[in-house]
Amino acid sequence: MYGPGDVHVEEREDPTIVEPTDAIIRLAATCICGSDLWPYRGAEPVEHQVMGHEYVGVVQEIGSAVRTVKVGDFVVGSFWASDNTCDICRAGYQAYCVHRVLMGTLGTQSELARIPLADGTLVATPGQPDPDLIPSLMAASDVLGTGWFAAVAAEAGPGKTVAVVGDGAVGLLGILAARQLGAERIIAFSRHADRQALAREFGATDIVAERGDAGAEKVKELTGGLGAHSVIEAVGTQEAMMQAIHSTRPGGHVGFVGVSHDVAIPGDELFMAGVHIHGGPAPVRRFLPELIQLIWDRTIDPGKVFDLALPLEQAAEGYKAMDQRTAIKVLLTV
């Protein structure tokens, strides 16, 4: 990305092993993330930045210290590389690993990628996947894992009413996660017919078109005036965060995973809300083994969030489609 709205696909040198803990993978697919739209729209600074942090593919080469994956394995990784052995990782928060590396600094919207800390980052699938499973495995690398963490952070589960703020890929997969975790009722905030339909397919029981305070009031109307037990915030704006908090009943839980931009929670509102708030960058690695198995067994089909597939060479068109909301999420084939 040269600058806002300016995406190029270029030939670059192939990545090589730098550290003995590295692996090189040949990507089977990559994709464009909603968070990539922040710099694309000028909300974050960007200048000649390699792009991409979601990836699946086949291991081509491993460093001398790599033990848990081998050449030829089909693997899924997270947008944070992690050693998966430090105290923070072992507590289930690999996104905060003491040795973490942000994959977006290396770029995975490419044919080949270097994956640091390969042993702790990459998870091999049970075998070579059927082609139709690749989009779902691709979703596990970020948006499914992030939506799953949001649902877990919001303590979605049996007997719970879950509300989901945001109808992008993460919010939609938060709905899928809440259903898998056993939520009794799932309220999706959405104004778009195609996203409403996918939300219902993933498990939403109610659709609310209102936003902000009006949206929160609608949730309270649907829940006997109390609010939802669990609320997922998957946008990252001030309005979305306050909508999430105001939609949550006292004692309930907010799981926030939208990349926060200029979000500030007034102390008095937070104090009087009586809600739990937990979130941030998702520790996708914690959930990858379980998510890969659910996909492999065809129990879930998160790949449905990809409603546009383009060759990598047309990445700029993919950015435009997501920016203009003509696509929910774009798969880039390699």
Image (spheres, helix red, strand yellow):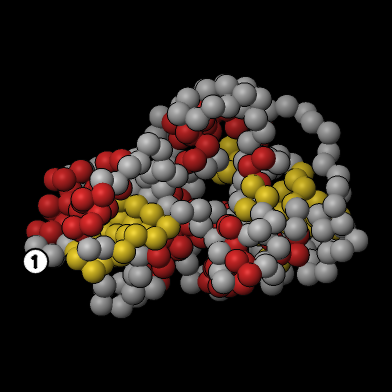
**Residue 135 position within the rendered picture, expressed as x and y whole percent measured from the top left:** 57, 54
What residue is shown at x 61% (from left), y 51% (from top)?
A: 79
Q: Which corner quadrant of the image does residue 193 belong to?
A: top left
Please say if 153 is above or below 218.
Answer: below
Q: Nearer the viewer, residue 102 or 32?
A: 102
Q: Is residue 44 visible?
A: yes
Secondary structure beneath dot 1 equals loop
Residue 309: image quadrant is top right
Q: Tell me the quadrant of the picture where the N terminus can be found.
A: top right
Q: Identify the image quadrant of residue 142.
A: bottom right
Circle 1 crowding by C-alpha within 10 Å: few under 14, some 14–19, many from 20: few
Q: At 42% across and 57% down in the image, what residue appears?
A: 279
Nearer to us in this view, 248 or 190: 248
Q: Quadrant of the C terminus?
A: top right
Q: Position of residue 101 (x, y in %)?
A: 68, 50
Residue 191 against residue 151 in the figure, above or below? above
Q: Is residue 188 visible?
A: no
Left or right, 217 with respect to 51, comes to left
Q: Position of residue 13 (x, y in %)?
A: 83, 33
Q: In the orientation shown, which residue stands out farthest toward the bottom?
A: 158
Q: Amino acid at mark 1?
A: Gly
What residue is shown with label 1?
A: 224
Q: Residue at x 57, y 71 (%)?
A: 91
Looking at the image, residue 12 sits to the left or right of residue 4; the answer is right
Left or right, residue 61 beside residue 242: right
Along the horizontal axis of the image, is 103 left or right of 279? right
Could you tell me which residue is drawn at 44 percent across and 44 percent down? 259
